[in-house]
Amino acid sequence: MKMRKLREIAGYVLGGLMFVLLIPTVMWLVSGRPGLRFEVVPVVRVVFSFILALLGLSLSIWSIVYMRHKGDGNPMDAFGHEVAPRTKHLMTEGPYRLSRNPMLSGSFIYYAGVCIWLWTWQALLVFVAFIAIMMLQVFSEEKRLRKDFGEEYEDYCRRTGRFWP
């Protein structure tokens, strides 16, 4: 039981570090490490990127908390391999009524904010690569959800968009 809890905590920490810090840092590095100070970046870009980043992170965090409490599991399933205990219940309420993948939708919004802040084609390229990789993950996960939840999942797919309402 203790090892399971440690794996779960490690999954949240590693996932958080990767999504919140690592990918934006890679965007910044490949962009040539542009100045991030408020006096260097136009204020409109700062405000807009900050709002997007905050909205995206909020949606992702809401999704994770909701999944943990209502789905009785967590999002740490990578390309069909269970990193930590999977959810036991199909979630269709809370953030999951807005999108079948609200964590990723939140990540996409967050990275769009980072791209606007950095304003480089290199950051945009990292963002596009992330989307492509995540699409593979989503297709793998959808296959598993169809197997686990059958017609209930098919009904959910018909009424809820993959990423956007």
Image (cartoon, grey):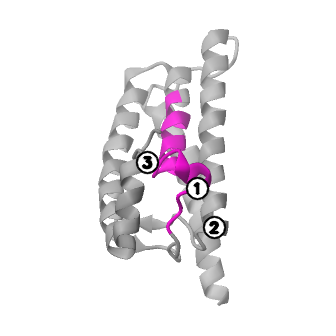
- Name the outermost residue toward the bottom: 1
- The earlier-in-sequence mark between 3 and 1 is 1
Q: Residue at x 41, y 44 (%)?
A: 161
Disc 1: which residue: 93
Would residue 41 be seen by someone viewing this image from the given angle? no
Q: Which residue is drawn at 54% across and 29% down?
A: 114
Residue 70's spot in the image, x, y percent? 63, 67
Q: Which residue is drawn at 48% across and 47% down?
A: 99
Q: Which amino acid does label 1 sit on?
A: Glu
Q: What residue type is labelled 3?
A: Thr
Residue 121's spot in the image, x, y percent? 37, 22
In-image side of 135 versus 1 (left or right)? left
- Tell me if residue 16 comes above or below residue 81 in the rendering: above
- Tell me if residue 109 comes above or below residue 51 in the rendering: below
Distance from label 3 to label 1 (Cα)? 11 Å
Q: Are marks 2 and 1 in contact (CB under 8 Å)?
A: yes
- Tell me if residue 35 comes above or below residue 27 in the rendering: above
Residues drawn in magenta: 90-112
Q: Is residue 5 magenta?
A: no
Distance from label 2 to label 1 (Cα)? 9 Å
User: Front-most of 78 and 158?
Assistant: 158
**Circle 2: element type:** helix
**Circle 1: element type:** loop
Residue 157's spot in the image, x, y percent? 37, 54
Q: Does the magenta stretch include residue 107?
A: yes
Disc 2: which residue: 70
Q: What residue type is labelled 2?
A: Lys
- The earlier-in-sequence mark between 2 and 1 is 2
- Which image quadrant for residue 143? bottom left
In-image side of 151 versus 73 (left or right)? left
Disc 3: which residue: 160
